[in-house]
Amino acid sequence: DMKQIAAYYDATGQVDFFGVVGSGCDTHNSLANVIPNMSYPPEPFLHLAAGIKNVVKVPVIHAQNIKDPHQAQRILEGGYVDLVGMTRAHIADPHLIAKIKMGQIDQIKQCVGANYCIDRQYQGLDVLCIQNAATAREYMGLPHIIEKSEGPKRKVVVVGGGPGGMEAARVAAERGHDVTLFEAAQALGGQISIAARAPQRDQIAGITRWYQLELARLNVDLRLGTRADEATLLDLRPDIVVLATGGQPFLSQVPGWEYSEDPAESLVVSTWDVLSGKVAPGRNVLIYDAICEFSGVSAADYLADKGAKVEIVTDDIKPGAAVGGTTFPTYYRSLYEKEVIMTSDLALHKVYREGDSLVAVLENEYTGALEERVVDQVVVENGVRPDEALYFALKAQSRNKGQLDLEALYAIQPQPCLVEERGQEGDDFLLFRLGDCTAPRNIHAAIYDALRICKDF
Ligand code: SF4
């Protein structure tokens, strides 16, 4: 039908070009196709645009999941369309064209299809990028290009290789400082590495891949597989210590969950335990999701993919309530297909063992009525609790007592302690913490913290 319609209008001579968009946006489910998230392959609707190009004379533009210059070049050289639109690609990296021109294609921050940008737009919020805290904040003075510092070269030690720590190391190194980054795991990524193990979510690892390339280019001294303690850090005689040590799943909050660090002793396990492969999938699983972000629905998708019978329960209005409008539909498609039961308005009150089974006691949020499920695994998503041990070990010794000046932070101004006179070289250091080791937050917020603080080192 569209080919006939396009050919008709083309023949009128009144049309300058056609912009072809696959799918429609009349339902939540079809809208998800229009701005394909990371669960889609590259250019999923190019064939539709190519079909229109076959029947019209004026140029055809297409823009759906075209993120990479080589991909764009292949599409144009193949003659499928005349112009490609790369919208999110420019939100993720507004310097995309400049980097192509300068032969710096490897330095392009490639969009990973997280749809943090578009999902915020549909809520009437500013269009922020999950991995680029400067986009849409240029007017506030947040830089895309980090200039070299005119001050003294400093020894900066970053602890934690998740998004906040990677951004802190990148920005400090761009400023020209001598940067060491400690990460306890064997690879960078932090919680991104766990998230990427879920079905539909592997492309989120692209955030880490860009940082790996950038940290190598900037000669950051990476100490992977190394858990930094107080003595290790002080041995390096740092001028600045940035803690981005993250957090741990907060399962100890509810006594009735009888959580223990040892999964064999514990009645509940975390979404991290399951997604990371630390704990084998159960056969008959109840997931309790008190947060309703990505982790709960990702764990449900993962477990169902492994053959488990899964029910995901939340006390919120629906499972995945905080997952954005162009992203929750692809989860729902997958969960319905895999016959995952989705239940709202119930809080996990307690768990007890009965023979070989676990009994989960659920309490209706509005009536207080109790009901039970008999399962063999209870997975809980309850956010993270900051990992603060290193912060409190170092706080008293630091020159700024580990304090951030919040007014300066919000105003995107340098931290006052950075511009004060330094003490005797090597005798003290400045201490900052960011990301989940301050309070639970998301990838974007951790990166935003890091850029705001470290751009003035
Ligand atoms: S938020 Fe995600 S989808 Fe949007 S531009 Fe950034 S990486 Fe791409």
Image (cartoon, helix red, strand yellow):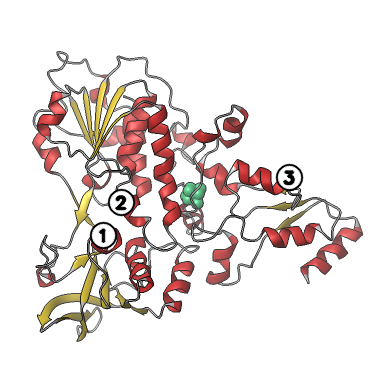
Residue positioned 44% across, 40% down in the render: 210
Q: Are marks 3 and 1 in contact (CB under 8 Å)?
A: no
- Give how far across and how far down residue 119 sits, in percent: 48, 57
Q: Is mark 2 on a helix, strand or loop?
A: helix
Q: Are marks 3 and 2 in contact (CB under 8 Å)?
A: no
Would residue 67 be found to the left or right of residue 141 on screen? right
Q: Is residue 454 above or below residue 435?
A: above
**Number of the front mark, 3 or 2:** 3
Which amino acid is tagged 3? Glu
Residue annotated with mark 2: 191
Residue 43 figure quarter: bottom right
On the question of residue 267 being in view, the answer is yes
Which residue is nearer to you in this view: 9 or 407?
Answer: 9
Tell which circle, 3 or 1, labels the residue nearer the N-terminal end: 3
Q: How far apart are marks 3 and 2 (CA)?
A: 39 Å
Which residue is nearer to you in this view: 20 or 198?
Answer: 198
Residue positioned 57% across, 36% down in the render: 96
